[in-house]
């Protein structure tokens, strides 16, 4: 299994904590980083985290056309981040080419932490092409997607990549586009609809992954410190 992570310099500090949580619960799982605008030193640091970590670092320039569409309600950094976020399909397709012998590919936000082994997820994905978390008819969670490298799985990713980058559709965010792709393809593709308990913003003990996405559960720094404390606790427990 490959876990794909994507981020730029602003979210770089999250990577170490997430990777450490993966090493605690999924020590044999490879990590494929898709990063943007990192320094050579930062790339080397990522590579040092694990002997199964692979980094593809690219340059991405700010798109002023997107800024114009956002200038009434978002700050300048957000459009650049959306340009990265909406490349999930591209990341997974590239990862499938790079690791042709792997059977399961996950893409997840870097401001998360894995809190248990994902064997249950592996079992549930048997016979399915794509695993998603739906949060209503018009939205699918973009922070955690799992795909098998079947023709139908690749079709899903290709369709998503095409739609999300078409006519600046990424201004609508990736969640709505994922829902559109689901509606277009769910009769052709075998989907596993994961329960919301898999991805928990409130740091529940029954979850598989904690996410710092929703600010109402604490600031990014507060969540980061909590996640780091959790990882350090688990590392000490495993060392006994």
Image (cartoon, grey):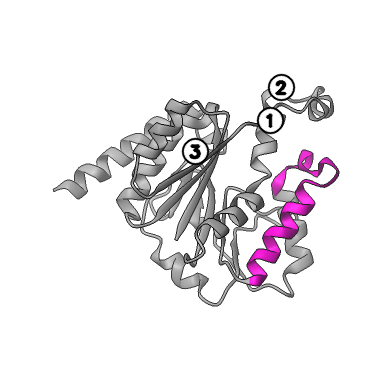
Distance from disc 3 to disc 2, alpha carbons, whole Å, reads 21 Å
- In the rendered image, the residue lying farthest to the left is 240
Judge by depth and name the residue closer to the eye, 45 or 134.
Answer: 45
Q: Where 221 sits versus 153, above or below?
A: above
Residue 58 vs residue 143, the one in the foreground: 58
Mark 2: give few (<14), some (14-19) or many (20+) Cα within 10 Å: some
Label 1: which secondary element: helix
Q: CA distance from mark 3 to mark 1?
A: 17 Å
For the residues bearing labels 2 and 1, Cβ distance under 8 angstroms? yes
82 vs 28, nearest the viewer: 28
Q: Marks 3 and 2: CB-CB under 8 Å? A: no
Check disc 2 and report the residue beneath it: 76
Query: Residue 18, percent across and down?
Result: 41, 42
Marking on residue 111 = 3
Residue positioned 65% across, 53% down in the render? 89
The residue segment tinted magenta is 151-174
Prevailing SS of the magenta stretch? helix
- Percent coordinates x, y for residue 217 in the rendering: 51, 36
Residue to which mark 1 is pinned = 80
SS of the residue under disc 3:
loop
**Residue ID at (71%, 26%):** 62
Q: Percent x, y for residue 215?
A: 56, 33
85 over 92 or under it: above or below: above
């Amino acid at each position: 299994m490959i876990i794909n992570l994507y981020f730029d310099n602003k979210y770089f500090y999250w990577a170490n904590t997430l990777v450490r949580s993966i090493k605690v619960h999924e020590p044999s799982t490879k990590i494929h980083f898709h990063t943007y605008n990192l320094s050579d030193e930062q790339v080397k640091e990522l590579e040092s985290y694990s002997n199964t970590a692979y980094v593809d670092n690219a340059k991405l320039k700010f798109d002023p056309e997107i800024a114009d569409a956002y200038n009434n309600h978002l700050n300048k950094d957000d459009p650049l981040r959306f340009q990265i976020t909406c490349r999930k399909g591209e990341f997974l397709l590239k990862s499938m080419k790079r690791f042709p012998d792997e059977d399961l590919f996950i893409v997840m936000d870097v401001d998360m932490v894995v809190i248990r082994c994902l064997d249950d997820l592996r079992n549930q994905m048997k016979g399915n092409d794509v695993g998603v978390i739906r949060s209503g008819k018009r939205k699918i969670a973009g922070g955690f997607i799992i795909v098998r490298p079947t023709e139908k799985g690749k079709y899903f990713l290709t369709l998503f990549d095409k739609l999300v980058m078409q006519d600046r559709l990424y201004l609508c965010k990736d969640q709505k586009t994922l829902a559109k792709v689901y509606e277009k393809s769910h009769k052709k593709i075998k989907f596993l609809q994961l329960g919301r308990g898999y991805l928990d913003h409130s740091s529940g003990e029954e979850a598989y992954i904690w996410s710092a996405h929703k600010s109402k559960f604490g600031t990014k720094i507060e969540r980061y410190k909590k996640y780091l404390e959790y990882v350090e606790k688990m590392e000490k427990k495993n060392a006994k």
